[in-house]
Amino acid sequence: MSILKIARMGHPVLLQRAEPVPDPTAPEIRRLVADMIETMEDASGAGLAAPQVHMSLRLFVFRVPPGRTTAAEGDGEMGNTVVINPELEFLDDDKVLRWEGCLSIPGLRAAVPRHTKLRYTGVDTEGAPISTMATGFHAGVVQHEYDHLDGILYPMRMSDFSLFGFNEELLRAKAAL
Ligand code: NI
């Protein structure tokens, strides 16, 4: 496995619509997924989409780390998870502001409106179908990573630019919970 170079905001690959993965069970996809998980863990990220490692393909990896769950919203801790050729179905019209960052936009975070409940489908590297309901942080990270596959970065979803800043300043101000 190896740590991949992460594309930062401004790189054109992050603004492209990614292509479906023709064969999710192909050895090169398995290798890409393993490298993406290692890269995500190395960067202490909660999610990573293939376009962020210069591969314009519709797949992402994520996890729900301890301490990021929102028990009141019914989500729980999750280990490393891959979703290939995902589709989202929103199950609620409600949106909430969630603080999020992005490995392609280092040092910054913002409050972004996200749906509260959704179902995502797709397949894993065995070709097995995935169909999962998500709420809370889980729902937020899936929407963030899915957006990467459509060339959308979180600032493009923001409604209030006063809730955007550098991690250090936000933590100092205790604004980012
Ligand atoms: Ni991101």
Image (cartoon, rainbow, N blue to C red):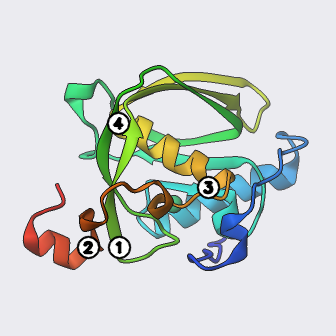
Can you see residue 1?
A: no
Q: Could you say whether the residue bearing mark 1 is in a helix, strand or loop?
A: strand
Please name which of the two marks, 4 or 2, marks the residue nearer to the observer: 2
Q: Residues within 10 Å of mark 4 (few under 14, many from 20)?
A: some
Q: Which residue bears the numbered disc 4?
A: 77
| Image quadrant containing the C terminus | bottom left
Q: Earlier in the sequence, mark 3 or mark 1?
A: 1
Q: What residue type is labelled 3?
A: His
Element type at mark 2 = helix
The residue located at (9%, 65%) in the rendering is 174
Q: Which amino acid does label 2 sit on?
A: Asn
In the image shown, does 58 or 61 lie closer to the viewer? 58
In 3D space, how far apart are the residues under numbered discs 4 and 1 (Cα atoms)? Answer: 24 Å
- Ligand 1 within 8 Å of disc 3? The answer is yes
Q: Nearer the viewer, mark 3 or mark 4?
A: 3
Q: What residue did someone put label 2 on?
A: 167
The mark lying in front, picked from 4 and 1, is 1
Image quarter of the N terminus: bottom right
The residue singled out by tag 3 in the image is 148
Report whether residue 158 is seen: yes
Given residues 65 and 101, the one toward you in this image is: 101
Give residue 46's quadrant in the image. bottom left
Are the two marked residues, 3 and 4, in contact with CB atoms closer than 8 angstroms? no
Disc 3 is placed on an element classified as helix
